Structures are given as C-alpha cells and as structure tokens.
Image: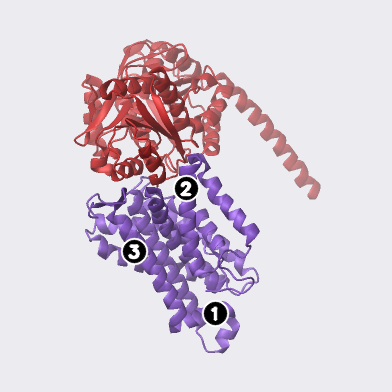
Amino acid sequence: MRTNLFKLSAAAGVLALTLSACGSDDGGDGGGDGGALAGEGTGDDCVIEGEVPVGAALSLTGAAASYGESQQNGLELATKHLNEKEGVTYALTVEDDQTDPKQAISVFEGFAGDDTSIIIGPTLSNTAFQAQPIAQEESVPVLAISNTAEGITEQGDWIFRDSLTEGQVIPQTVAAAVETYGLENVIVMYSNDDAFTESGYDVMASSLEEEGITVADTLTFSKADTDFRALLTEAKNADPDAIFVSGLIEAAIPLVTQARELGIDVPIVGGNGFNNPQLMADAGDAAEGVVVGAAWNSASDNPENADFLEAYEAEFGSGPDQFAAQAYAAMTIIDHAVREGCDGGREGIQAGLGNITDLPTVLGSITINENRDAEHEAVVQVIENGAFAVLD
Amino acid sequence: MQQLLNGLFIGSIYALFAIGFTLVFGVLDRLNLAHPAVFAVSAFVGIELVEVAGLSIWLALPIVFVVGGILGMIIERVAFRPLKNRPDAHFAGLISSIALAGMFIALLQWRYGPNTRRFPADSFPNTTFSVFGAQVTLVQVAIMVISVGLVIALTLLVAKSRLGRGMRAVAENPTAARVLGINVDRVTMTTFAISSALGAVAGALFAMNVNSAQLGMGTAIELKGLAVIIVGGMGSLPGALVGGLLLGLAEVFAVQYLSSSWRDLVAFGLLFLILLVRPQGLFGARKVREV
C-alpha cells in the first residue's frame, strides 16, 4: 500500500513537472500569438476574434489605495468605451497589489503565467521596480500608468509608460514658479523613504540649481508622518520665498494646513503627489497658492478630454483625477497599438506601442519616445479659490 | 519657543496614548497591542460624529471617550479573558490583541475605504494666538488641557478612589485581591475600559491636531507609545506623562539642532540610553510594579 502510494505520488509529480514545463514554453511565446488574437485589417477596420486579455496590478488596498481606486475607475470606463467600438474587445482583469512589492510580484507572475497580453501598472514606482523585471523576463509588455520615477522603462524593452516622469514635469514647474514669483531663496522638503518622492526631490534639487536658486535648507520626513510642525518651524526660521515639497497627498494635506497655521504664507510648490483635488477639499483655505505641475489638465478642452470628464462624472458621480485620466489614456494607447498591426498578442502589442506618435488622448497628443516613455506637454497649475487654475 | 510648544503639544498626545497603554500593563501585567487600533478607530468615529451626525466637537469628544471604553471592554472580553488561565497568558494575549487590532482596522477599511479623512474645516474655531512670537492654535491649547486634565484625573482616581484601591490591589497580587473580596474580573474590565477610553480621546485629538486620520495612524504611534512607557517606567502613570513630553521634545529638538533625518534616531537613541542607565525607566521601581 505504502509503495503504491509512493509510486502514485512520484508519477503525479513527474506529470506535474512535465505539464508546467510545457506551460512555461507556451508562456514564452507570448499569449496565443498567431491564435485567435491575430486578426485581419488594420486600424479602425481591424477585427480580432478573441478577447484581448489585459491585466492590471493596482494598489487597491494599502497606503496607495486612493490612487489605485481612481486608476481602476479609469481603466474600467475606458474598457467599456472601447468594447462598444466594433472589431476588438478587451477583457480587463484587475488585481490588487496591496501597495506591497511582494504581492505585486506574485500578481505579475500570475499574469505572465496565463495568456494576458499586456500588464498595466503597478501603481507605485518602488513596487514597479520590483515587479516589472518579472514581465521583462517573461516577455510580457507592461504599460506603467502612474510611475514617475526615473529608470522605470530602463528595466527593459518590454516596459513602457504613459505617465510623464517627474524629470519631465518638475523642471517646467520650477521654471514657472521661479519666473512668476521671482524666487531667490527657498526651502526643500521631501519624504526620503519612498522611491517616487525621493526621485522627485532629485529632479527638484537639480532644477533649482539650474535656475540658480539658493536652497537655504533641505528637510526630510517619512511618508507616514502627519505632524510637520517641527520641520515647518525650521523652514519658517529661514524666511524663504517659497517651500518646495516632494511628498504624497497623505502628507501634503497636513503639511499645507500646518504651514498656514504657523503663519507661513509663501507659495508651496509640490510635485506630482500634490496633484489631487483632495488637497483643496481637505486643506480648505490653506491650499490657496499651492503650485503643482501636472501631466493632465482637468480644464483642458480637447474633445477626448471633454468626453472623458462627462462620462466619468456620469459613471462614478465625481470628477476624475490625473490617475484616472492616465489610466483611461493607457487603454486608448493599447487599443491603438493592437489595431495598428491588428494583433492582440504580446509581441504585436510591444511592436505597436513603440510606434505611437501624436496619438490624441485625454492627456493631450502623446508620442512614445525611443526610451519607451510618453512625451506630451505638462501644465503648471496654482490653486485659486479652491480650484486648479493655470499658472501664468 | 515655537519648537518648545510643538514638542509639548505632540508630546502631550504621546503621553495620553501611552498612559492608557501603561495602565493595563501596570495593573494587569498585560500588553494590549489592540490599543493602537483603538487610537485609529476612535479618530474615524469622532470624524463621523462631527461630519455626519453634525455634533459639536465638545459633544463628540465625550462620546468618543465612551466608545473607546466600550472597545476596551470588547478587547478584554474577546482577546484577553478567554486566555487568562492559560500558562502562556501573557504571550497569548499579546498575539490575540494583535489579531483583534487587525480585525478592527479591516472593519475600518471596509466602512471608510482607504482614503485619509479629517474633521470638517469649521468644526473647531480657527483661532490662532501669538505667544512670545510663536503661533499656537486653540485646538492645540485644548489638546494640552484635555490631555493633562485626563492624566491628572486618572492619577487621582488610582490614588484615592475605591476603584483605584482595587486596581492597586490587583496589580500587587490578583489572587490575594480576590481573597480580600475584590471583584478581580470587574476591576480588570474597568481598567481596560479606562485605558481604551484614554487612547480613544488621544486618537481623536491627534487627528484634529494634524488635520489627518489614516488607517495606519495607530501603527505609526505604537512604537513611540511603547518607547514612552519604557522610558517612563513600565506601569508608571507620571512616568508616561513625563516620558511622552520628553519624547515630543526630543523629536523637535533633534530637528532643530541636528537634522530632520535624525529625528527617530535621536528619539529611540534616548530610549537605549535610559534603558542602559536606568533599566527600570525614569519612574519605575525595580521589580515592584506601581500603578
């Protein structure tokens, strides 16, 4: 009995090994190339029989969950709109990375192991640095929709992004703020335990140096901090013309509130983390005069954006933020890449993404450059009367 | 001057949080790691009371106090009492309170989602004073008064009242206390209730002070609370008050005179130093527990 059981389990083990070996071979070829995902025609006439599987790894719980929720909304709305069009249908699967790189890795492994044609996400840059190598190894294209740290797309030729880097947005923001307010002497604050805010700080510091601005002091905090009074008192003592901050929205709201409370009334210039309508809603009057560079302007009146604003409001009962817009744009970009070669397989999409030029999206006209990063114009905003206005 | 006040305000919240923490430890010799979850839950409850029920902050705070007390009783009933006669009751209670804390936070996320919440902007008069050139808000003064007031009230309660005598007897020797006719179960439950009620008020005040309430806010303060009760002497109430203020001041002066990155290093370095020089903490007595 015992030997039988042993033989049986050994046989089962061998069988499982063989099967999984076959499975990984298939995966390497890229989900169903030449199968149901290769269609006929091109562009608007492209018809693909099977559904193109799109996987998204988003932070639906954990510290970055507020961003993940917006992204999920943007993706679902875009998928709905694309599926109303003839020819190509998309099957969207959203998985939670729990704002945890370990979890994101297993989500990526899951997508790479099944037939998923492209992975969207993950939400945070430091998660992306850990999870994206999985996709690169398994030859699955990735489209990052909110990672703004330097070096994301340097991870390999399968990694693309549609979010402008801090390196693209912050120099424009710094230049605009310096010119508008005639800044000479500033304080810089950033949270030094997060890849995104740290890389934002690096760009901020080098842009300030290029503009010839004196940085009186650089103060660091942790992304979980909520009491900034000690730091802000330090900042106030230096009597700066402005305070530059690279931090996430969770820190931005208490920071801005406490700064105004302590009587600091100079402009506060934030990185991408400040680009959230929650800032006005929750910091109230304290948010007035905060300057933020953004990849997406909610007031932009291009037709794609106008339609998007209306549809989003109707679907979710509130206005979209930049994260929803970038997620929505991602599906537009993917759809264009698929239809170009009329191929919903992994290699087809990779080739298509590399050819995106002047594509009209809710973010404006997008070109994917040779580094696989998106290029489009940024907008510098200032909060006036509780709303983002263009700084000029 | 501004930094001194910054340190005292944040320190008084640390103290209020730590005093609840240390009370359970001092009387019952249990470490209740669901305390930080109470801190977070009550901040959200307070916001709900002001924002949705439309109560004034002065009415909401006492309700938060009561809700905290009820949570304390739940914690005692669910996480501690069923384990009390086990040989590993200390460790089992520690773990089961962590488990209960996880459940509280999960419920909180289910109810409120992941977003940061805050008290409505006009829920507290937006008055600012200038004291020797430093800016002080009315909220901060209220926080200081409430924190110190509650700490004094608790100290008096423990020193003078019948309940306090019961607590001290239980702290000394639970079996003897039972023999003397003290209802140990009731004292235990009351101790948990008072402890959590204080933690609850601390949570609501903290959310008001920094204009932000997050699911993880308890975790962020948990280690600091532990540091405070160790610095003050495990179980010592005046120790927790002084320890809290000391930690608050150490943090802001680390920022002022060293560098912002050194804040935690200095605060926790202080902890090591005190443990080396005075292992029983500033106000702790060796081997003999105080309440």
- In the rendering, which numbered label is found on residue B145? 3
Determine whether, in the image, residue A231 is placed left or right of residue A360: right
Q: Chain of mark 1?
A: B
Rendered shade, chain B: purple
Determine whether, in the image, residue A138 is placed left or right of residue B155: right
Amino acid identity at mark 1: Val
Residue B65 picture location, percent across and down: 35, 67
Amino acid identity at mark 2: Phe
Residue B132 higher or lower than B168, as above or below? above
Rendered shade, chain A: red
Residue B81 picture location, percent across and down: 53, 72
Closest to the observer, B148 or B55: B148
Closest to the observer, A94 or B44: B44
Determine whether, in the image, residue A308 is placed left or right of residue B16: left
Mark 1 highlights which residue?
B170
Point out the tag, 1 or 2, that comes first from the N-terminus: 1
> At 37% from the left edge and 55% from the top edge, which residue is drawn?
B206
Q: Residues within 10 Å of mark 1 (few under 14, many from 20)?
A: many
Q: In the structure shown, which secondary structural element does the residue marked by tag 3 occupy?
A: helix
